[in-house]
Amino acid sequence: MASDRKVHVFQEVAKHNKNEDCWVVVAGKVYDLTPFMDDHPGGGEVLLAATGKDGTDDFEDVGHSDSARDMMEKYYIGEIDPSTIPLKQISIPAQGGQSNPAKTSDFAIKILQFLVPLLILGLALAVRNYTKKD
């Protein structure tokens, strides 16, 4: 690791949340992963999701290999000041990815997939009853 152990303030680290500027906090250490964005096996979006918060749990949950842990050393830029980490995690939304507006349309499609057949069934029953001869 680098010999200079610069201490970073959490609010400043949280601002680095873009594809072109991505800093992540893991186990109290700050890493500038900008050069690694295109090379990360899970994609840059995974790294962006870990910005603006303590990414230790995200990193550990994946179960990274020893070589991945060793690789982190070249991206190390300092330590995080623990007193600046908010008790309630605030997250500045990542600006490199897009929000998913399709969620709203997915909901509408599911509703229509349910309502349209019911409407057709009701219409068919109404036509049958109206045209039925006694």
Image: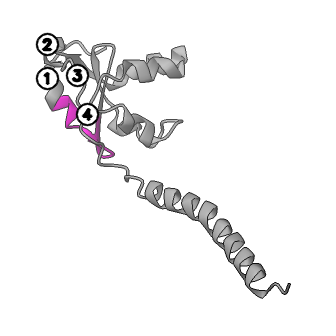
Label 1: few (<14), some or many (≥20) within 10 Å?
some
Give above or below for 126 relative to 109.
below
Query: Amino acid under label 1?
Result: Val
- Percent position of residue 101, x then y: 41, 58
Residue contact between numbered discs 3 and 2, judged by CB atoms under 8 Å: no
Label 4: few (<14), some or many (≥20) within 10 Å?
some
Q: Residue at x 23, y 38 (%)?
A: 92
Q: Which element carries disc 4, helix, strand or loop?
A: loop
In this view, the mark in front (1 or 3): 3
Residue contact between numbered discs 4 and 1, judged by CB atoms under 8 Å: no
**Quadrant assignment, res 63:** top right
In this view, the mark in front (2 or 4): 4
- Percent position of residue 13, x then y: 20, 30
Q: Residue at x 78, y 80 (%)?
A: 128
- Would residue 71 be counted in the magenta stretch? no
Distance, label 2 to label 1, CA atoms, is 9 Å
Quadrant of image for the N terminus: top left
Residue at image mark 1: 9
Counting residues from the N terminus, which is met first, the one under dot 2 or under dot 4?
Answer: 2
Residue contact between numbered discs 2 and 4, judged by CB atoms under 8 Å: no
**Quadrant assignment, res 11:** top left
- Percent position of residue 108, x then y: 50, 61
- Checking the image for residue 88, the label placed there is 3
Distance, label 1 to label 3, CA atoms, is 16 Å
> Which stretch appears magenta?
12-22
Residue at image mark 4: 91
Counting residues from the N terminus, which is met first, the one under dot 4 or under dot 1?
Answer: 1
Q: Which element carries disc 2, helix, strand or loop?
A: helix
**Residue situated in front as seen by the camera: 101 or 12:** 101
